[in-house]
Image (cartoon, rainbow, N blue to C red):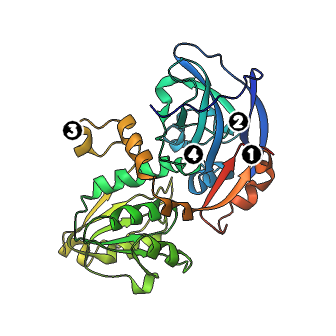
């Protein structure tokens, strides 16, 4: 396990948590804090990440009724649409619980909350070489890693990633690290070009998307993006779809090269471990530990474009989760001045 970090003093039996209470409205509410035991730990949060895509949907109250069970996060409180405590990217220090865990810095799939209790099975040790703020990206890195596994991408492949949000950029980062790959990030926002090139990839806007490539990843959650992704695929290529459309009906261009070129369109979703890796013994825990190791690179700090204090979070929700919000990752800090 990692070196111990001095725990903070144990405080009250309640803690503040962010709840979405109405469309684009959030408030901090006191919630009960469970007691530590041999199987339960109390964690003092240091950082969480606001997941713009998923939490925008949650905060807007737009989770389709038929998707509610699939959209629940592991340690959610409340039901859709409101009020609901939601989130899955928390880094903190264990301040009470089993002796072996006290003082450990951990990643937990937990909503935004200043202190929380959970079963020790939810705790994932953050390696010493990973800064705690960057460790909060682990859940998104896990999604990107699973997509890489699902794609079968290999050395020297030509790769296109359509959609330069956080997951798309993490896939770009991973694919570009493979020997000899030629990776192009495609996005309508030219500001993504600098990050793509920093990761060792090319950048193009949709009209200039490369054609005939080996592997395509689609993350834009748009009909136009899916069409761009399919058009980029070469003979016998694979298009990996990561976008979540909810109850929306999406039209996809499945004529032309799609059939003649035997293009494969496959889904990738982090809720299931890529079958080949699952067959070889990979578990949710070992995959998340791999994701934590993969966020060790300082280059990934460019993805964190804003930091906000937890106490300032509720009034900022409409701005941070707006469809046209600038930047990429909003890091929530629990270190009050």
CA gap, disc 4 and disc 3: 30 Å
Helix, strand or loop for disc 3: loop
Q: Residues within 10 Å of mark 2 (few under 14, many from 20)?
A: many
CB atoms of marks 4 and 3 within 8 Å: no
134 up-or-down from 186: above or below: above
Taking 19 as reference, is 205 left or right? Answer: left
Q: Name the residue under label 3.
A: 280
Report the front residue among 272 and 176: 176
Earlier in the chain: of badge 4 and badge 3, it is: 4
Tell me the number on the disc at residue 132: 4
Helix, strand or loop for disc 4: helix
CB atoms of marks 1 and 4 within 8 Å: no
> Residue 25: x, y in percent?
77, 49
Q: Name the residue under label 1.
A: 310
Q: Can residue 268 be seen in this view?
A: no
CA gap, disc 2 and disc 1: 8 Å
Earlier in the chain: of badge 2 and badge 1, it is: 2
CA gap, disc 2 and disc 3: 37 Å
Q: Name the residue under label 2.
A: 114
Q: Can residue 39 be seen in this view?
A: yes
Tell me the number on the disc at residue 140: none
Between disc 1 and disc 4, the foreground one is: 4
254 up-or-down from 130: above or below: below
Helix, strand or loop for disc 1: helix
Earlier in the chain: of badge 4 and badge 2, it is: 2
């Amino acid at each position: 396990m990692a070196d111990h970090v001095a725990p903070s003093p144990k405080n009250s039996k309640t803690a503040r948590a962010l709840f979405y209470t109405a469309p684009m409205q959030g408030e901090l509410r006191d919630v009960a804090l469970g007691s530590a035991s041999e199987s339960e730990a109390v964690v003092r949060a240091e950082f969480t990440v606001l997941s713009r895509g998923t939490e925008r949907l949650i905060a807007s109250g737009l989770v389709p009724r038929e998707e509610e069970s699939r959209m629940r996060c592991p340690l959610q409180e409340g039901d859709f649409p409101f009020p609901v405590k939601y989130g899955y990217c928390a880094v903190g220090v264990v301040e009470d619980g089993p002796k072996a865990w006290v003082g450990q810095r951990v990643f937990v799939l937990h909503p935004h909350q200043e202190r929380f209790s959970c079963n020790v099975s939810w705790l994932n040790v953050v390696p010493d070489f990973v800064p705690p703020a960057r460790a909060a990206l682990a859940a998104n890195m896990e999604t990107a890693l699973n997509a890489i596994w699902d794609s079968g991408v290999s050395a020297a492949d030509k790769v296109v990633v359509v959609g330069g949000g956080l997951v798309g950029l993490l896939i770009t980062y991973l694919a570009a690290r493979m020997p000899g790959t030629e990776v192009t990030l495609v996005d309508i926002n030219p500001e993504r070009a600098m990050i793509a090139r920093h990761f060792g990839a090319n950048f193009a806007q949709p009209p200039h998307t490369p054609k005939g490539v080996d592997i395509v990843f689609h993350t834009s959650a748009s009909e136009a993006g899916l069409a761009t992704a399919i058009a980029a695929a070469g003979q016998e290529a694979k298009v990996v779809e990561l976008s979540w459309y909810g109850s929306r009906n999406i039209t996809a261009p499945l004529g032309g090269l799609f059939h003649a070129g035997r293009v494969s369109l496959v889904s990738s979703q982090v809720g299931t471990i890529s079958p080949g890796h699952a067959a070889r013994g990979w578990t949710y825990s070992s995959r998340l530990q791999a994701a934590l190791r993969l966020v060790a690179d300082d280059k990934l700090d460019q993805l964190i474009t804003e930091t906000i204090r937890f106490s300032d979070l509720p009034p900022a929700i409409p701005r941070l989760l707006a469809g046209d919000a600038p930047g990429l990752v909003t890091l929530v800090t629990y270190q009050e001045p």
